[in-house]
Image (cartoon, rainbow, N blue to C red):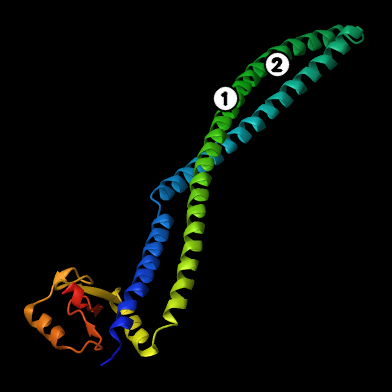
Amino acid sequence: MTKAAPSEQMRLLDLQVLDSKLRALDVQAKGLKDDPRLPDLHAGVTVAKSDLVVLDTAVSDAARKLTKAEDDVAQVAARIAKDEAKLNSGTGLSKDLMALQSDIESLTKRRGELEDVELELMESSDEASSRQAAQQALVAQMQTVLDEVVSEIRGKLGALRMERDATAQERAELAATFDPALLAAYDRTLNKYGVGAARLFHGTSEGSGMQLSPGDLADLKNAAEDDVVFCPDSGAILVRSSEWG
C-alpha cells in the first residue's frame, strides 16, 4: 500500500485543482472547435460558390452567343455595304443591278432579324451578369461571416492555449515536489478514472458525490493516517481530515 504523510496527501488536492482546470480548458477548446455555427456556414458558402459557378458558366455562354450574333450582323452589314457600293456605281448590266437590289433587300431583312436576336441576347447577357453580380456579393458576404467566426474561434483558442500552457507549467512544477510513488498512484488514478484525488467530507466522497456506506467509512477510519486510501465509487484517492469528519 502506498503511504504518504497527511500533509502530502492534502497537497494532492492542489494538484487536482490544476488537473481539473486543464480538463476544463480542453473541454472548452473542443467546444470551440465543434462550434455549431461552422457546419452551416461552411455548407452555405459551398452551396453559394457552387451556384456562382453555374452563373459564371451562364454568363460565359451568353457572352459567346452575343459575340456570334454581333459577328453575324457585322457580316451581313458588310455584304450590304459591298452590294450597295456596286449598285451605286451604276456599272454592269441592268439585270445584274436588279439582282443586286434584290439581294440588298433580302440582306436588309436578314440583318433586321439578326439584330432582333442580338438585342434579345444582349438582354439575356445583362440579366445573367446581374444575377452573377448578386451571387458574387452573396458569396462575399457569407465568406466574410465565416471568416469572422473562424477568426473569433481562433482568437479564443489562442487564449485558451496560452492559459493551458501556463497551467500545465504550474502543474509540472507542483508535481515535481511530490514523492514519485505518491505521484504515480495519483496519476494512475487520474488517467483511469478522470479524478486523481478528492476530499472525504462528512462521509461523502467528493470524487463521486456519494455518501460512503457505514462499512466503507469504518474501514477508512481504521486506516492509518499515512495510508493512501481510495474512493470505492470514483476510484479517486480520498484525502481525509479530522476537520471534515
Percent x, y of residue 242: 19, 77
Report the residue at 37% width, 84% height from top: 183
- Describe residue 76's horizontal placement relative to residue 190 as left or right: right
Q: Nearer the viewer, residue 196 or 240?
A: 240
Image coordinates for residue 190, horizontal then vertical, percent = 32, 77
Outermost residue toward the front?
243
Residue type for callout 2: Arg
Asked whether, in this view, residue 201 is left or right of residue 61, the answer is left
Q: Which-is-in-front pick, marks 1 and 2?
A: 1
Look at the picture and state if 175 lies above or below 86.
below
Which corner quadrant holds the C terminus? bottom left
> Badge 2, how many Cα within 10 Å: few under 14, some, many 20+?
some
Q: Nearer the viewer, residue 170 or 85?
A: 170
Alpha carbon of mark 1 to alpha carbon of mark 2: how far? 24 Å
Please tell me whether residue 43 is drawn above or below residue 79 in the rendered image: below
Q: Secondary structure at mark 1?
A: helix
Left or right of 109? Residue 156 is left
Residue at the (7%, 82%) spot, across then down: 215
Label 1 neighbourhood size at 10 Å, few (<14), some (14-19), many (20+)? Answer: some
Counting residues from the start of the chain, the first of labels 1 and 2 encountered is 2
Three-letter amino acid code of the residue under disc 1: Glu
What kind of element bears circle 2?
Answer: helix
x and y, in percent, of residue 147 in the image:
53, 46
Residue 174 lies in quadrant: bottom left
Tell me which residue sits at (42%, 80%) in the image.
175
- In the drawing, does residue 84 fall left or right of residue 124? right
Q: For this rendering, which residue is in front, 109 or 13?
A: 13
Residue under pointer 2: 111
